[in-house]
Amino acid sequence: MPTANDRTFYLTGASSGIGKALALELGSSGLNVILAARRMELLEDVARQVEERGGLALPVRTDVTDYESMRRSVEAGIERFGGLDVVVFNAGLGRPPEGSEGVEGKLAVVRTNFIAVLYGFDVVVPLFRSGGGGVIVGVSSLADVRGFAGSAVYSASKAALTLYLEARRAELEPDGIHVMTVRPGFFRTPMTEPNKFHMPFLSEPDKLARAILRGIRLRRRMVVSPMPMWLLTGMLRRLPGWLFDRLNASSYRKIRKDHAQ
């Protein structure tokens, strides 16, 4: 459980997957949760489940790719709960939205996975500085280690996010603002459901939610899960370029074949 001072959380991507699992864990800890996502009907259902577990929830329709939308949802949460202690930037896209084509679809992934976090930092950092500190959590991915064929834009956006969080951690530490990076492997969520390829060490999102809360409580710099996937990606990072290229191309051919079937 987070520390006694971590009472109010702002959580993006809260309507499903990892975000929903984390919201329910927060509810079980009796905490206040500002639930931010675009699908209001799903948010309201998550809010109901949070409150059934003993927490308090405020669902706010939010487009994280719109600065003003995020600012308004943060302000609505502060007005409801009287403050803000922990922010979790969890919203993400694994692939372009259905119906989006070409560059616009790719940009949608970058806006959601990376640009939205830039907006979020600009919204909450001044609040935390004036309030004496806080915690910011960014959910990246173990796909940040190399450029994985078939996930080029996703890998690139998460690599950018991981490096950004690392830099901001050093910049904000003097202000009493702790920045934690979360790097998940494969978890059973709506994002991974369409994947037809083998997902090593596929895990349930509630496991990651508990790991995130432990990380916040202990003020860790990074949370990785599941650990075997972290070890596997660590080995991939260390492969010489020529060998990784061969394995990457072979894996991509298999993915294309599986999707064609």
Image (tube, grey):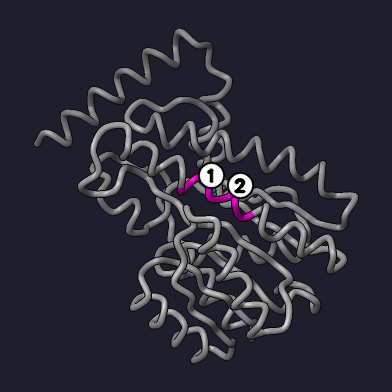
> Does residue 6 lie above or below 111 as drawn?
below
The quadrant in which the C terminus is found is top left
Q: Residue at x 32, y 58 (%)?
A: 190
Q: Quadrant of residue 71?
A: bottom right
Decide: few, some or many residues near mark 2? Use Cα within 10 Å; few <14, some 14-19, many ≥20: some
CB within 8 Å, label 1 to label 2: yes
What residue type is disc 1 on?
Answer: Ile
Q: Residue at x 58, y 20 (%)?
A: 238
The quadrant in which the N terminus is found is bottom right
Decide: few, some or many residues near mark 1? Use Cα within 10 Å; few <14, some 14-19, many ≥20: many
Q: Where residue 210 appears, x then y in whole percent?
A: 59, 66
Q: Residue furthest top?
A: 242
State the separation of the CA atoms marked 1 and 2: 5 Å
Question: Is residue 255 in the magenta section?
Answer: no
In depth, the one of 75 and 26 nearer the eye is: 75
Report whether 40 appears left or right of 56.
Answer: left
Question: What stretch of residues is rendered in magenta?
Answer: 112-120
Question: Element at badge 1?
Answer: helix
Q: Where residue 150 appears, x then y in whole percent?
A: 32, 30
- Mark 2 = which residue? 118
- Mark 1 = which residue? 115
Q: Residue at x 84, y 65 (%)?
A: 130
Mark number for residue 211? none
Q: Where residue 113 appears, x then y in whole percent?
A: 49, 46
Report whether 8 appears left or right of 150.
Answer: right
> Would you say residue 205 is visible in this rendering?
no
Question: Element at badge 2?
Answer: helix
Q: Residue furthest front?
A: 68
Question: Is residue 116 in the magenta section?
Answer: yes
